[in-house]
Image (cartoon, helix red, strand yellow):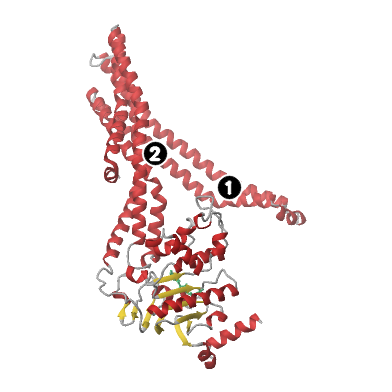
């Protein structure tokens, strides 16, 4: 934490560290000041007593105020550190070849936990500085006590007892709460049942009130019995812990008074021990609490380190890519014996797929839920690598091509498209980040996606804000969001693969038909220029039949493929599904 803070803003870190240490160091010196004040007062030295009183006053002011000034600086550094760590997390999530890492449950858990815990970064930096201050306090206090009498060094040790025994007491209560959780929930449930209008009807009819009350009482007294016992035990433990320190405290005072009697110490030293002994108990307890907090942060840092390592490993994958994406497709995209399973499972979702998606053509993928359609699309987009087999662009292997180069040539609209709550023009323009500020390009994409209606629904049009996530933006319907997603896809002007994965899930049949036709026209134009393939997944056969090639997936395998006429003539799965839908819709 300190290293990160120093890299981000060394000046602020030093300032806050110095202020914090001065504030904390003041505390033991207050005790020394009080000793001098007492001695001066007893000897009747008014001027020495006045000076000592002034010093105590200044030190008290330091103790009270410097922490607040330190806060001004470390708060800002803490915020910078939080931003830096969040950015780092974003880099880890987006590093690597495809989506394999994001799908890895261990990686996903690590990211979620780090994300949740990073909000404590600010508190962690404060805790590190406070711990430094406390250690300084304990050090000064220990030295002063040792100079008075080495036996007094037992005081900080005795101060550990209330903390550890207090923790044991808290664990007793927590365990009891856990044991009583079921009966407590049961009692709450019965009470809720007895007061819910819907249930009261039946309870009255069955005369169940007395039985409910009896059960509630039984459950309630069972859990309170457990909790009371635990609280009593905890109170006894806590008092025992405090007694250990109280004994040590009493012993220290007796010791120092006996030294005064022997003339080896003065009355001021008694005041000093009384004050320091109380301080040391607070210091030890606070330091242990901070250590526990920092242990939690330590776990976050360990998780972040694991993410860093796996990012390092992921960054080396695919760096050897030497192929180039062809400017245009002449033959098409060919899948050779492609099989795939998701990371973390070994269930094959795609098996031995052999397909040729012809350059400039439109291809529809159909199949029942879970057949593997979206997975095939993700593989073609380069978001995952086949576990065996190859995907060829004309004759070059997709695996040899740098990820970014291929992704630039893919224009996708996924089933679970993103709802970017940004300005409308930004949400669309993200389809081609280089042209995100190009208003004409955005307007043109909106036009080609027929998303004018969705844009008009947003106050401010292209400059209007979408969503209520952080501002008072416009709420759009599912279909309108999808139109904007389609417009985003249209921002890509030279795609080699156009993908519409169930584009019409949120649209009606007529709208889907219109979208597909428009898409096919625009794809046809693109296809004629650079041989791009249009791929779409749909459950609506009225749209599917328009495609040049229809691929029917069944349980991760290609069951059949061909044109609508060919597949109908074959009388296989496609003809069966087509007939079924036709019957349902008539
Ligand atoms: N990220 C993932 N991790 C593990 N398994 C997954 C993942 N995504 C999908 N699957 C599994 O892969 C199989 C194929 O899913 P896919 O989404 O490709 O089917 P689909 O044909 O597109 O279905 P639908 O018509 O419902 O969209 C399913 O059994 C699904 O549970």
Find the residue positioned furthest to the front: 440
Q: Is residue 289 above or below residue 493?
A: above
Cα gap from disc 2 to disc 1, whole angstroms: 27 Å
Q: Camera-side residue: 267 or 282?
A: 282
Left or right: 541 with respect to 277? right
Image location (x, y in percent) of residue 448: 50, 69
Picture quarter containing residue 557?
bottom left
Image location (x, y in percent) of residue 216: 64, 49
Label 1: few (<14), some or many (≥20) within 10 Å? some
Which quadrant is home to the C terminus? bottom right
Find the residue positioned furthest to the top: 44
Give the secondary structure at mark 2.
Answer: helix
Image location (x, y in percent) of residue 163: 38, 37
The answer to whether any part of residue 468 appears in the image is yes
Picture quarter containing residue 282?
top left
To which residue does mark 2 refer? 165
Q: Mark 2 or 1 closer to N-term?
A: 2
Instruction: Confirm or reject: label 1 Cβ below 8 Å from ligand 1.
Output: no
Q: Is residue 31 above or below residue 284?
A: above
To which residue does mark 1 refer? 222
Q: Is residue 360 above or below residue 456?
A: below
* Residue at 34% in and 50% down: 85
């Amino acid at each position: 934490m300190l290293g990160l803070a120093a890299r981000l803003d060394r000046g602020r870190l030093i300032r806050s560290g110095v202020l914090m240490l001065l504030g904390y160091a003041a505390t033991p010196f207050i005790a020394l000041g009080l000793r001098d004040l007492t001695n001066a007062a007893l000897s009747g030295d008014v001027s020495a007593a006045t000076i000592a009183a002034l010093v105590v006053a200044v030190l008290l002011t330091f103790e009270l105020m410097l922490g607040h000034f330190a806060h001004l600086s470390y708060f800002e550094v803490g915020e910078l550190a939080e931003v830096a760590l969040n950015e780092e997390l974003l880099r880890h999530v987006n590093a690597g070849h495809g989506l394999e890492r994001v799908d890895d449950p261990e990686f996903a858990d690590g990211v979620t936990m780090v994300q949740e815990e990073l909000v404590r970064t600010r508190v962690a930096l404060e805790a590190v500085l406070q711990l430094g201050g406390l250690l300084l306090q304990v050090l000064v206090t220990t030295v002063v006590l040792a100079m008075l009498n080495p036996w007094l060094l037992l005081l900080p040790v005795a101060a550990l007892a209330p903390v550890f025994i207090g923790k044991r007491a808290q664990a007793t209560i927590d365990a009891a709460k856990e044991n009583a959780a079921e009966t407590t929930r049961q009692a709450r449930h019965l009470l809720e049942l007895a007061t819910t209008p819907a249930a009261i009807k039946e309870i009255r009819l069955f005369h169940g009130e007395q039985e409910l009350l009896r059960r509630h009482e039984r459950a309630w007294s069972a859990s309170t019995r457990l909790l009371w016992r635990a609280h009593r035990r905890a109170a006894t433990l806590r008092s025992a812990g405090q007694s250990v320190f109280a004994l040590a405290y009493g012993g220290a005072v007796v010791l120092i008074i006996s030294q005064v009697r022997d003339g080896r110490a003065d009355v001021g030293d008694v005041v000093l021990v009384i004050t320091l002994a109380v301080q040391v108990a607070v210091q030890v307890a606070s330091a242990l609490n901070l250590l526990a907090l920092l242990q939690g942060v330590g776990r976050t840092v360990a998780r972040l380190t694991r993410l860093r390592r796996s990012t390092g490993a992921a960054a080396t994958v695919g760096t050897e890519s030497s192929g180039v994406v062809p400017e245009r497709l002449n033959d098409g995209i060919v899948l050779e014996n492609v099989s795939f399973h998701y990371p973390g499972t070994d269930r094959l979702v795609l098996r031995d797929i052999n397909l040729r998606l012809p350059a400039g053509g439109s291809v529809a993928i159909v199949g029942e839920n879970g057949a593997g359609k979206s997975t095939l699309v993700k593989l073609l987009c380069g978001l995952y690598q086949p576990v065996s087999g190859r995907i060829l662009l004309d004759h070059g292997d997709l695996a040899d091509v740098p990820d970014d180069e291929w992704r630039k040539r893919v224009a996708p609209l996924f089933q679970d498209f993103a709802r970017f709550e940004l300005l409308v023009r930004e949400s669309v323009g993200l389809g081609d980040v280089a042209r995100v500020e190009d208003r004409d390009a955005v307007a043109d994409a909106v036009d080609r996606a027929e998303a004018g209606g969705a844009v008009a629904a947003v106050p401010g049009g292209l400059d209007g804000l979408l969503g209520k996530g952080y501002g008072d933006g416009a709420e759009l319907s599912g279909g309108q969001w999808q139109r904007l997603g389609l417009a985003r896809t249209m921002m890509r002007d030279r795609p080699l693969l156009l993908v519409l994965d169930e584009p019409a899930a949120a649209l009606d049949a007529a709208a889907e038909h219109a979208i597909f036709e428009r898409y096919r026209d625009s794809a046809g134009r693109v296809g004629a220029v650079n041989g791009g393939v249009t791929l779409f997944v749909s459950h609506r056969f009225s749209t599917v039949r328009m495609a040049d090639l229809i691929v029917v997936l069944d349980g991760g395998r290609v069951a059949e493929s061909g044109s609508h006429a060919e597949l109908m003539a074959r009388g296989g799965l496609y003809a069966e599904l087509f007939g079924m839908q036709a019957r349902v819709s008539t």
